[in-house]
Image: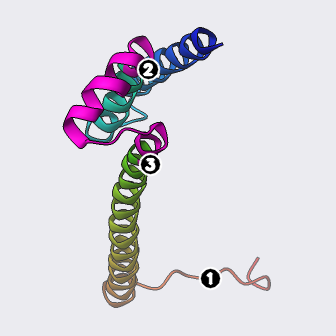
Amino acid sequence: MLIKIQIIVGLLSIVLLLSTFELIRKKRLREEYAILWLFTGIAVLVLSLWPGFFLSQFFVRITGIFYLSAVVLIAFSFLLLIVLHFSVVISKLTNQNKELAQRHALLELKINELKKRYLPPEETITSSGL
């Protein structure tokens, strides 16, 4: 049963890596954000290839955590950090978008004022003049 899960997780990580590269190639994902997804895909792929080594030896030596549920907690914390990072980026972009919309409205107002001041008013065609 464990080998089937390893294969499925390994294939899903390969799909994640290929999808990330494709999104970068089509310029739908910026490189600065793709680094997180590439790192995550590589980490999941490595863990799916050698789960016994990393879960039983590597993590135990580094963290001192012996239980698999604690490792899942670490992975969940990593994903929460990714979500937090993207929330900060989205907030920054929202503020920039609002500022640009306000600047656009002010420039449009100035253009309309300049048009009224320096351009002659357009002649209106009356129905009785035809």
Can you say whether 68 is above or below 13 in the image?
A: below
Q: 66 or 97, which lies in front?
A: 66
Q: Earlier in the sequence, mark 3 or mark 1?
A: 3
The answer to the question of whether label 1 and label 2 lie on touching residues, with beta carbons closer than 8 A, is no
Can you say whether 47 is above or below 33 in the image?
A: above
Q: Position of residue 129 (x, y in %)?
A: 73, 82
Q: Is residue 123 left or right of residue 90?
A: right
Q: What residue lies at 39% left-to-right and 85% top-to-bottom?
A: 109
The answer to the question of whether label 3 and label 1 lie on touching residues, with beta carbons closer than 8 A, is no
Q: Is residue 67 left or right of residue 99?
A: right
In magenta stretch: residue 58: yes
Q: Earlier in the sequence, mark 2 or mark 3?
A: 2
Q: Position of residue 83 (x, y in %)?
A: 43, 54
Q: Quadrant of the C terminus?
A: bottom right
Extent of the magenta region: 47-73
**In the rendered image, which quarter is residue 23 located in?**
top left
Q: Which residue is mark 3?
A: 73
Q: Earlier in the sequence, mark 1 or mark 2?
A: 2
Q: Quadrant of the N terminus?
A: top right
Q: Is residue 28 left or right of residue 130?
A: left
Say the numbered circle drawn on residue 92: none
Q: Which residue is mark 2?
A: 22
Q: Which residue is mark 1?
A: 124
Q: Determine the main secondary structure of the stretch shown in magenta.
A: helix
Q: What residue lies at 35% left-to-right and 54% top-to-bottom?
A: 81
Q: What residue lies at 58% left-to-right and 9% top-to-bottom?
A: 3
Mark 1–mark 2 distance (CA, rounded to whole Å): 56 Å
Q: Is residue 35 left or right of residue 44?
A: left
Mark 3–mark 1 distance (CA, rounded to whole Å): 72 Å
Mark 3: give few (<14), some (14-19) or many (20+) Cα within 10 Å. few
The amino acid beneath tag 2 is Glu
